[in-house]
Image: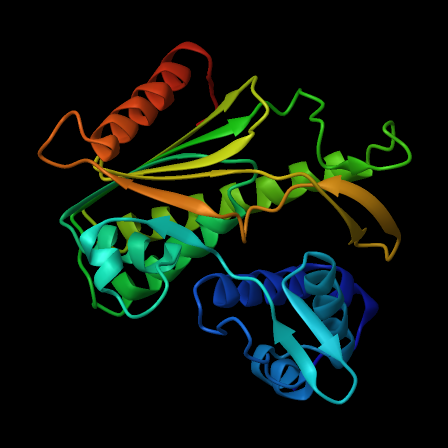
Amino acid sequence: MTGTGKDEAGGQEFRRVAEELRVRMADGVYPLGSYLPAQLALATEFGVSRNTVQRVLEELRNEGWIESRQGKGSRVIKNQRIQSWTPRASRSRQALTLGPLIGEAFEQPEVTLDVYTLTSESLDAHIRTQAERIHARNIAPQRIALRVLLPSESMTLPYPRAKDDQDDPRLQDRLHHITKRHTESLREVLTALKTENLVPSVELEIRHTPLTPTFKLYVINGAEVLHGVYTVIERAVVLDDGDKITALDVLGFGTTLTHHVRDADPTSPGSVFVDGMTTWFESVWTRLADRLS
């Protein structure tokens, strides 16, 4: 049964559907050039109204994920690209995406993730996916240690902001709301894994740093790094109250990431890059960041 209320379209259900579709497109569940399911099928799957689905599709068009043509549906025109020169990537028949890389990390007995990001939205989505695998007993890590660096809440960031009114606070407020929602979700998901005795050791620490993120960084199990710069774009943002703002913004999902791996040669490009970014993260974490939790 689908919902019909305006609050649903502007609130939690709208965000839930948009986030799930972004993850699916980023990880190639809906590959480039493919079409999303019909609006009625999406509304039925997610238990929401057609109005909610229509607003989600508008949001995804504004973000550059899809293009829509009358009578043909919504075609995927962007995904999460990862450039990697590791042997396993070159052997794969499919494009390398973030989901499988995070999934491989969680198949190890110990999982360590150091993440520097703007909102933690995409991180939350991938951690929830791995938590589902753990609940299903498909994987069984013994320790998960996650450290997250976020921009200080007291900072006025250069993005997102209204293109024609730099003093309009609504996009910054929206950013803080998104960040808070996903950090709370991370805490709930990881705490549940420990409380239910599914993972013996679970650690989550979040700190704020007085830096504007110009790139996204994942340090995976101390041996792999994913790095991608944020590109500023102009796009329409629809607020929860229905107002539309032309914004200068950056997108986390869909950012092109480069994949680097430490190998046996400490002077190789991969080893040097992993060591450099690991050192950078540790320096900011210990010297610039304020403890949040």
Which of these two is toward me, 265 or 24? 265
Q: Is residue 198 visible?
A: no
Q: Residue at x 85, y 37 (%)?
A: 163
The image's colouring method is rainbow
Q: Is residue 179 above or below residue 167?
A: below
Which of these two is toward me, 196 or 287? 287
Query: Looking at the picture, how far across and down is residue 263, in whole percent?
Result: 14, 37
Q: Residue at x 74, y 58 (%)?
A: 62
Q: Quadrant of residue 233?
A: top right
Query: Looking at the picture, how far across and down is residue 240, in whole percent?
Result: 79, 54
Q: Residue furthest top?
A: 287
Image quarter where the C terminus lies is: top left
Q: Is residue 196 left or right of residue 206?
A: left
Q: Is residue 151 left or right of residue 115?
A: right
Count how many numbered circles sit on residues in the image.
0
Q: Is residue 42 visible?
A: yes
Q: Residue at x 57, y 82 (%)?
A: 45
Q: Is residue 114 left or right of residue 45?
A: left
Q: Is residue 134 above or below residue 118?
A: below
Which of these two is toward me, 85 or 6? 85
Image quarter where the N terminus lies is: bottom right
Q: Residue furthest left?
A: 264
Q: Quadrant of residue 36?
A: bottom right
Q: Residue at x 57, y 17 (%)?
A: 210
Query: Looking at the picture, how far across and down is residue 88, in whole percent?
Result: 20, 57
Query: Looking at the picture, how far across and down is residue 224, in whole percent?
Result: 26, 40
Q: Is residue 133 above or below residue 2?
A: above
